[in-house]
Amino acid sequence: MRHLLYLIFFLCTSWSLFSQTTNPLITKDAEAQQKWVDSLYNQMSLEEKVGQLFMVQAFSNQGLAHENLISQLITNHHIGGIIFSKGDPMSQARINNIFQDASKIPLLIGMDAEWGLSMRLENTYAFPWNMTLGAISDNSLIEQVGKQLGEHCKRLGVHFNFAPVVDINTNPINPIIGNRSFGEDRDNVTNKALAFMKGMQEAGVLANAKHFPGHGDTDSDSHKTLPTIHFDEKRIDSVELYPYRSLIKQGLSSVMVAHLNVPALEPQEGVPSSLSHHIVTDILKDSLQFQGLIYTDALNMKGASNFSLPGDIDLAAFLAGNDVLLISEDVPKAITKIMEAYDAGIVTEERLSHSVKKILQAKYKVGLNKYKPIETKHLIEDLNRIKDETLSEILFENAITVLKNKDEVLPIRKLEKKKIAYVQMGDDDGSIFLKELQKYTKVHEVSADNLDELITKLSAYNTVIVGFHRSNDSPWKDYAFSDKELVWLYEIARTNNVILDLFVKPYALLNLSTVENFESIVVSYQNSEIAQQKSAQLIFGAISAKGKLPVSVGNGFHVGDGIVLSNLSRLSYGLPERVGMSSEKLKKLDSIAQYAIDKKMTPGIQLLVARKGKVVYNKNFGTHTYDKGSEPVSFDDIYDVASLTKILATLPLLMELEENGIVSLDSKLSDILPEYANSNKKNITLKKMLSHYARLKPWIPFYYVTLDSTKHPDPKYYRKEPGKKFSVKIANNLYMRTDYQDSIQKIILETDLLDRERYRYSDLPYYILKKYIETYYDKGLDELVQTHFYESLGANYTTYNPYNKFSGKKIVPTEIDDYYRYQEVHGYVHDMGAAMQNGVGGHAGIFSNANDVAKIMQLFLQKGFYGGKRYFKPDTVDEFNTCYFCDKDNRRGIGFDKPQLGDEGPTCGCVSMTSFGHSGFTGTYAWADPEEEIVYVFLANRTYPKADSNLLLKENIRTDIQSLIYEAIID
């Protein structure tokens, strides 16, 4: 009586559904489909019809004997389908073609590919797990996952993907679902599953909702035993069955019935749901009006196989209403059992034809009426596409969830005030996370053998990022903190400002008895490379925070929680396709850079491209020198950037002064430096001087007059040991007279001007500006650029005199000097005039890496804003990025170089006229284009071992690369 009432209840609640559901297996050309189905069915023997009910498991990595066994089932028992399991795609494609060729009727191919083919196959792509996707608000992204995953399946000849999982994971300790679920909220799970289904079926691959009637609140694994669902009928109907209603209404192709003990729905004790006529037929087929294919879960699972003998299980499952019997333990015996039941009238012709014809309808729908073998050419590439990696980047950017953010710790601001430590916990690798953090500022990894030692070490830092990393190999891997880790974590949080970042499922937070002492908590869900990169970018505000918690995890954190954070306009890092560029086309940069290395135009290169605020290409080539065993160039090596110093150091400081009204572009030298009042340069304005239009000499070899008759440093000017009168360090064991710096300024003051106004590039303006800026602030240029810009930008690899801060192994040498210093110039500025100013020149002296240079160029590109801080007004940047003397055939802006006005010049000729940048004598180049939002940085030491040959310039290496960058734009 109880079940009769329940059936009536279902019929009432499903009345509107009844009027709208249709057979999801029917195609648009239904008449042709029916004709094909009937033609095949009418030609089949009873054994062939029964054989169609079976989908057997096949492996592509178990050798010829296994292949022969499956082939025999195909030819001798006429099975209807294959569910492929472990192996690799090339092998699967090969044996798939063999199996299809052996089958009289094309086989329906299925796979468990919930998060991608990688669930079963090597060398295939893994999308994020459903729990991760459950944190995403934009369901169109989930639909795109379904579509792209479906494209993978279709490419490999897979017609049915046993996904999405629609189980509502209301039990945190569920041993088999967990990460496979979209979460605990029925509406979120339903909407995500619906989007996934739509995308996959749009790709031509049929979806399968599982595990009916709901496996989300079990505490045991149906692979090993028969789990029990203890809820009453009302709860099951309102929660567990809710997703099925929506998906069925929207054209769900198939359902998989789980092996569950559901006393509220099945009166006979211990009968698995997969063998229950009431659950499969009365509820799923009749009440929910589902007309698609119904699969059993694998019949070799203990949840089913413990109930009955092989063959008997299959018959019971078929009689319950299932159409496809998945992974039977004994196909021949099962076929015999069903045929005997048919002969005995237990299985009617109507019942048999109902299922077999649905299977044939599905085969027609997936195109098996026009079967084609799988093409193996480019198969691996087609299953691992750039578009898949691009989508995963977007998914993690939308999923990563900020749960706590006390005092707005995130995103991290005011880098100049931060001392940041990273502590790794868990048993998996967190090195990608650390490297990504270090792209933004100085972050030290801190570890210790005991807790006291660790706490002592951490006392030197004011921010501690704890990364909890556990295996990303599968969604079933352990995710919990160990007891020791919890003790350490609580103590770290008690004594430090802590950002806790979890690279595991959010249920790990259930281990925490309190979160009181954590300033910030981030859930990154998985320990994949992309998750680590994107989480680091979020912490520093390069990307925004959007994720919402898909499950409740205690300590006041509920499903749907998630703090939205805006980005700070810092550079992020990702794939070119994210910003309308082609990865494939950018590969051409590799060949030109390598050509320059091979032809010994420079020992090494750092090469970076960013667009729309995202670094999309950042590679290193060659070595520090040509010596055998020389260090390969790495991300954190620093180069002497030569004249890039002008726009990376002196110009920003001058822009500040101009914006603050201290000077103007019309200020004259006599206005800012009194000693120029009676000189021939008194009326030169900053505008003309920085446009290289002030009649100043291009260069004065100040060092030359300090050499003796043998062209070596004259003892009159130099000593090997420092002293009060010889304090200017030129190089190792070489110190210049302290007062000669004044002589340099005097020489500039008194030197003649050129005979007329015309464009002549000159370093002299930056000697003059260095004098003025340092006088105004009463501080050195090296200190000023650090405190005004580099520290807050996180430009920690950018400095004057790097030998004071960095190991020689991280500093790239510039030349073997045989004309002035007579040694390898390594860690000291190459430019002689800058060296004579204690390594701190207004025109040269800065060392940096490509990443830091890109930050400063991006600051200019963003009109003076970076990292949540405004350094300049937009008008100030525009004022300096203006060509004031273009009508005089002078392309220059104020400090910035600009594109050529004719055929030849500093660029490829393909950049916008609003673009700007500079080049350096050592082979360096930096350029920004506001119109295309591109930053391009090229660092090299082409001057090593000798500076006299400039093949980089002669062969247009830097501008050819620039041209290829623009050719790579595809939007």
Image (cartoon, grey):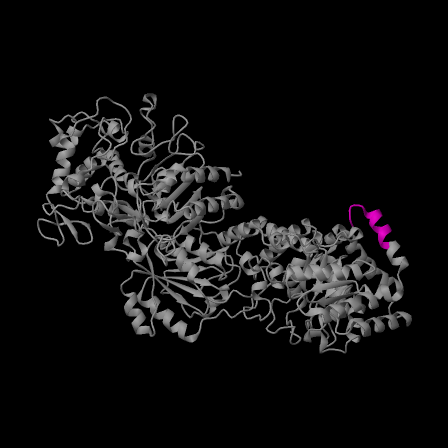
Q: Is residue 566 visible?
A: no
Q: Is residue 752 visible?
A: yes
Number of labels in the image equals: 0
Rendered position, 817 above or below 74 = above
In the image, what residue occupies the spot 49% across and 64% down? Answer: 504
Q: Quadrant of residue 752?
A: top left
Relative to 841, 246 lies left or right: right
Relative to 655, 857 lies left or right: right
Please, which residue is most extreme toward the front here?
710
Q: Quadrant of residue 10?
A: bottom right
Rendered position, 670 above or below 248 = above
Highlighted magenta segment, given as a residue range: 26-37
In the image, what residue occupies the spot 12% across and 35% down? Answer: 746
Q: Nearer the viewer, residue 598 or 550?
A: 598
Residue 164 x, y percent position in the rendering = 64, 59
Q: Nearer the viewer, residue 684 or 757?
A: 757
Q: Quadrant of residue 292?
A: bottom right
Rendered position, 762 above or below 857 = above
Q: Nearer the viewer, residue 884 or 591?
A: 591
In the image, what residue occupies the spot 67% across and 75% down? Answer: 226
Residue 631 x, y percent position in the rendering = 36, 57
Residue 773 x, y percent position in the rendering = 19, 39
Q: Is residue 529 magenta?
A: no
Relative to 171, 597 lies left or right: left
Q: Nearer the viewer, residue 766 or 615?
A: 766
Q: Could you tell me what secondary structure mostly forms the magenta stretch?
A: helix
Residue 295 x, y percent position in the rendering = 73, 64
In the rendered image, the quadrant that contains the N terminus is bottom right
